Image (cartoon, helix red, strand yellow):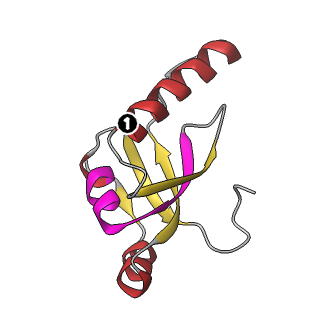
């Protein structure tokens, strides 16, 4: 199932060529696991997603430790790569004063 893309992300990309987003991944930890195991699985999922994208397409703004997600500044090319990644659950616009600060 493809990720849910907030239409505002596409609007921002069309307007400026970049969008500040929150990327939510499917939970790689599954059921009940220890905090240490959760952090390790989240980090591995984040690493796998980030490895597909060169720094020219995605600028990492924040990496969450216990939540399967990332805050980033992306290009249209990055959106296409993320859209095709089965680990990605959703991509939403992270406006000024977003939750990642």
Residue 6 in the image, given as x and y percentages of width and height: 42, 69
- As drawn, is 59 to the left or to the right of 62? left
Helix, strand, or loop for circle 1? Answer: helix
Magenta segment: does it hold 45? no
User: In the rendered view, would you say 3 is above or below 5?
Assistant: above
Nearer to me, 82 or 3: 82
Left or right: residue 86 compared with residue 27: left
Query: Which x, y percent locates residue 20?
Result: 54, 67
Q: Residue at x 44, y 58 (%)?
A: 91
Q: How many marks?
A: 1
Where residue 77 sits in the image (x, y, percent)? 28, 62
**Residue 33 can be seen in this image:** no
Residue at far front of view: 56
> What's the residue at 41%, 87% (across, down)?
15
Q: Which residue is pictured at 39% across the width and 31% down the height?
A: 48
Image-quadrant location for residue 8: bottom left
Give the residue drawn at x 32%, y 41%.
52
- What residue is disc 1 on? 51
In the displayed structure, 94 sits above or below 42; it is: below
Quadrant (top left/top right/bottom left/bottom right) for the C terminus: bottom right
Question: Does residue 14 appear left or right of residue 25 in this picture?
Answer: left
Residue 3: x and y in percent read 33, 53
Res 56 → quadrant = bottom left
Residue stretch rendered in magenta on the structure: 69-82
Foreground pick, 60 / 27: 60
Magenta stretch contains residue 76: yes
Would you place residue 95 above or below residue 35 in this image?
A: below
Hey, which quadrant is residue 22 in on the image? Answer: bottom right
Residue 47 visible at all: yes
């Amino acid at each position: 199932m493809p990720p849910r893309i907030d239409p505002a992300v596409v609007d921002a990309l069309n307007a400026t060529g970049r969008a500040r987003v929150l990327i939510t991944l499917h939970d790689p930890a599954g059921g009940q696991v220890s905090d240490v195991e959760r952090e390790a699985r989240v980090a591995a999922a984040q690493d796998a997603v980030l490895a597909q994208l060169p720094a020219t397409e995605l600028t990492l703004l924040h990496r969450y430790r216990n939540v399967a997600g990332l805050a980033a500044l992306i290009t249209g090319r990055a959106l296409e790569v993320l859209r095709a990644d089965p680990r990605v659950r959703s991509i939403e616009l992270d406006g000024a004063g977003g939750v990642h600060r």
